[in-house]
């Protein structure tokens, strides 16, 4: 429905409203971080976030978080959400990625088959203060740069490049015709080394490559045509028993009802051959994640769907005005469509055993940035790309005129975000050290010479 009754019905009014929000939170005050404000320990927040997950996988999540500071950061969205909620905010809301960090931007195949590079993880998406995404992504640039062996100066320059580009793009988007903003693309991606390497990996991540990686030929039974099944890699990939597999496949009926008719027809051209449980990511470890292997026009036409459990966003408890999502899988799918230039053509949602899931293609030309590539000039150039992509996502899903009014030329905001990012990166390392000394620490500590390969 067109919002003809909107009170801020002009460019000038929206921009002035953004400027007025500086009285609520000055731009230079974004740099503040004081862990003394915490009423609960980081570890207790993390423990609480594990409730409802597969108990046998919780130790694996802790293990992945303990492996490095950046790994800890990837799994610690609930901690950062609680910390951000302690701080004053602008009140300027947009659709948040929620888990904006350097490895949650990546390549994937668009509906026309061409590769797209964009924000590509929306498990935590929700409407909230725009600066929360900026603070998380800025902190990730510092942590990734440190992990890659980069200099502190380069990490700082990358954050500055990220924020400056974000602010400049917001100013451009604020004046752009709405349709042009919806069509806005970035054409220099191939010239940015870390992105170029990710795109090369994505070219190789074909459905046939996934077929060879995740499946194997089943042992033929009498009078049965030989076919492929998932290749078990315990505990990371487990084939489901027949009854479990039938329940997962039955959940696809609800998923299909939400697809456009042409895409529903496309799914019907495939037949399901096998179903497995798969462990994914760091933050998502312990959630229920299923993969379905389909075959279309013969053995060289595989399709893999991922049916991934979605818990409420970690930010939801702190955003009363956001309200509880009607369906967590739908929250993720709709947040993704709102922010991305192009989304997976088979993106949707379903429910299974009173749990809610997002449905999407698995590994369809997907690839993310390698942290080891993020150092020196590559980190700084990548910071600029992050700024442009995040600004585009926020502008598509929010009001760029309001953002532009608040940010102005962005210089004071840039310095404050850099101050916050460096302080919160240090905080993340301190929180990880607490984990390493806790009962949840892996038996073999990261870097232990007895760990083996």
Image (cartoon, rainbow, N blue to C red):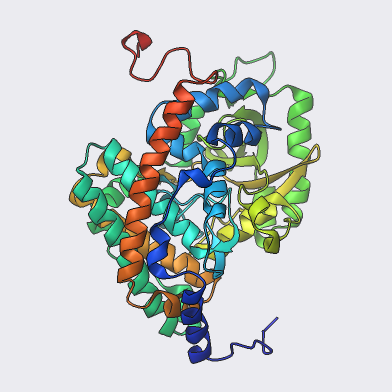
Q: Position of residue 31 (x, y in %)?
A: 38, 58
Q: Which residue appears at 67% of the width and 36% of the height? A: 272
Q: Position of residue 349 (x, y in %)?
A: 69, 50
Front one among 236 and 405 = 405
User: Which image quadrant for residue 93?
Assistant: bottom right
Q: Position of residue 111 (x, y in %)?
A: 51, 59
Q: Is residue 132 above or below residue 277?
A: below
In this rendering, does residue 409 appear at all?
A: yes
Q: Is residue 65 above or below residue 399?
A: above
Q: Which residue appears at 48% of the width and 72% of the height? A: 395
Q: Which residue appears at 47% of the width and 30% of the height? A: 65
Q: Position of residue 173 (x, y in %)?
A: 42, 78
Front one among 315 and 354 = 315
Residue 107 appears left or right of 257: left
Q: Is residue 393 above or below residue 180?
A: above
Residue 305 appears left or right of 376: right
In the picture, which quadrant includes the C terminus? top left
- Which residue is the extreme one toward the top? 450
In the picture, which quadrant includes the N terminus? bottom right
In this rendering, does residue 290 appear at all?
A: no
- Which residue is the extreme one toward the front? 36
Q: Which residue appears at 29% of the width and 36% of the height? A: 147
């Amino acid at each position: 429905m067109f919002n003809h009754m909107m009170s801020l019905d002009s460019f000038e009014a929206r921009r002035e409203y953004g400027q007025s929000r500086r009285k609520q939170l000055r731009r230079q005050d974004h740099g503040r971080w004081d862990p003394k404000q915490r009423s609960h320990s980081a570890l207790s927040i993390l423990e609480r976030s594990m409730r409802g997950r597969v108990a046998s996988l919780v130790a694996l999540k802790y293990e992945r978080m303990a492996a490095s500071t950046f790994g800890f950061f990837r799994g610690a969205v609930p901690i950062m959400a609680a910390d951000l909620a302690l701080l004053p905010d602008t009140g300027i809301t947009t659709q948040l990625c929620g888990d904006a960090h350097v490895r949650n931007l990546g390549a994937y195949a668009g509906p026309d088959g061409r590769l797209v590079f964009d924000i590509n993880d929306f498990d935590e998406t929700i409407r909230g203060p725009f600066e929360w995404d900026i603070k998380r992504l800025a902190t990730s640039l510092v942590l990734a740069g440190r992990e890659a062996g980069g200099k502190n100066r380069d990490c700082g320059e990358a954050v500055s490049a990220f924020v400056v580009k974000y602010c400049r793009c917001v100013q451009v988007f604020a004046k752009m015709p709405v349709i042009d903003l919806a069509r806005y693309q970035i054409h220099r991606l191939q010239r940015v080394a870390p992105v170029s390497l990710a795109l090369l990996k994505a070219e190789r991540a074909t459905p046939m490559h996934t077929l060879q990686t995740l499946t194997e030929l089943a042992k033929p039974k009498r009078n049965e045509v030989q076919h492929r099944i998932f290749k078990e890699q315990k505990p990371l990939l487990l084939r489901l028993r027949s009854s479990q597999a039938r329940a997962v496949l039955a959940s696809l009926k609800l998923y299909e009802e939400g697809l456009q008719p042409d895409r529903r027809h496309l799914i019907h051209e495939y037949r399901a051959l096998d179903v497995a449980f798969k462990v994914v990511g760091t933050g998502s470890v312990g959630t229920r994640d299923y993969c379905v292997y389909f075959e279309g026009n013969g053995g060289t036409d595989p399709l893999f769907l991922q049916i991934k459990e979605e818990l409420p966003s970690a930010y939801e408890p702190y955003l009363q005005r956001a309200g509880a999502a009607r369906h967590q899988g739908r929250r993720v799918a709709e947040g993704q469509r709102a922010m991305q230039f192009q989304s997976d053509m088979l993106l949707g949602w379903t429910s299974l055993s009173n749990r809610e899931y997002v449905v999407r293609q698995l590994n369809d030309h997907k690839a993310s940035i390698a942290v080891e590539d993020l150092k020196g000039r590559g980190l700084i150039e990548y910071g600029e790309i992050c700024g442009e992509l995040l600004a585009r996502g926020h502008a598509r899903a929010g009001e760029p005129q309001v953002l532009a009014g608040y940010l102005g030329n962005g210089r004071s905001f840039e310095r404050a975000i850099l101050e916050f990012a460096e302080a919160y990166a240090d905080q993340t390392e301190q929180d990880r050290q607490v984990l390493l000394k806790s009962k949840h620490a892996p038996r073999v500590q990261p870097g232990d010479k007895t760990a083996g390969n």
